[in-house]
Image (cartoon, rainbow, N blue to C red):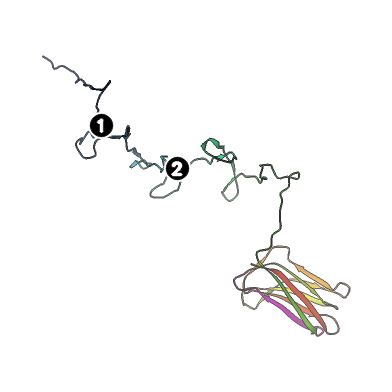
Amino acid sequence: MADIDGQLGIRSRQDGLDERVLVKINDATNPDAAGAGQAVSDGKSHTRIHGSDSDGTDQEALLSQEGHVQSNGDYDVTNNKRPSSQGLIVSDRSASTDETTMNKRPTAVLGNDDKVAIDFAISDSSGNRIDEENPLAVFLAENPGDEITDFDQSAAVASDASTNHDYVVSAGLAFKNLNISATSTGYAKFELQIEDGVGVGTYTTKQVLFNSPSNSNVSFDLKKPQSFLAGVTIRLIKTNLDNKAQDLYSTINGIEA
């Protein structure tokens, strides 16, 4: 006689007005081992979620302190070779923001030097665009650097003789916004030079100006922004081109920061 292909029945147990079936979930290979059974407390089944990472290695999923599944967007050659990525979402402007206000997606465009530039616009506090009808208010603030006004009076310079007005950039600072004014009552030549390096003693001429009794003032104003390093000498060579001795005046102006 053939064996009967039957199943074992499940018995329920009366518990007050209800009946219940007790089921244990254990490890199939070693069900009696410590920690091999499914734990339940407070009506919750406690389960460790496992899965394979991008290299096929078994890993346990982790949660944040708020219960969210953690994602890691930082590349690491060993621990995170394929980092998570997600789009940037911003909230509607309001006094209080939460998940329900997060519904705006910013845009971007490919820029130069292999960069992606996020689009943004300068607006006023109400979000209105800045244009001719709604200009951006700008206020001038005091320059954070030290203003330099270095005056020099070369007295009784002989005819055809020269004198130098030197300014050495202060230690630890850079000299910017250079402009120079110079004057004399008679004919004179003024030559602006910049030292080629700190203490090297050689100079490069940047500009030469001449005056006359009818137009006695000259002004050096370098249009291209330049910065001169600490220790470099800024030199103005003043030459008397008149037929008698005269005083030659000059002022070196700028910002050290």
Residue found at the very far front of the displayed protein? 16
Question: Within 10 angstroms of label 2, few (less than 14), some, or many (20 or more) residues?
Answer: few
Give the foreground label among 2 and 1. Answer: 1
Q: Considering depth in this image, is 141 or 247 the residue closer to the camera?
A: 141
**Residue visible at 24% across and 39% down in the picture:** 35
Q: Is residue 160 magenta?
A: yes
Name the spot of residue 94 as percent of width and height, x first. 59, 40
Mark 2: which secondary structure? loop
Residue type (three-letter) at the residue carrying disc 2: Ser
Residue type (three-letter) at the residue carrying disc 1: Ile
Q: How many marks?
A: 2
Name the spot of residue 107 as percent of width and height, x first. 59, 41
Name the spot of residue 198 as percent of width and height, x first. 61, 75
Name the spot of residue 12 as percent of width and height, x first. 23, 21
Q: Quadrant of residue 211?
A: bottom right
Q: Give the range drawn in magenta.
A: 158-173
Query: Which residue is identified by label 2?
Result: 84
**Residue visible at 67% across and 65% down in the picture:** 226
Question: Within 10 angstroms of label 1, few (less than 14), some, or many (20 or more) residues?
Answer: few
Q: Please state, as top left, top right, bottom left or bottom right, where the C terminus lies in the image.
A: bottom right
Query: Which residue is identified by label 1?
Result: 25
How far apart are labels 2 and 1 at the CA level? 34 Å
Q: Quadrant of residue 161?
A: bottom right
Dot placed on the residue nearer the N-terminal end, 2 or 1: 1
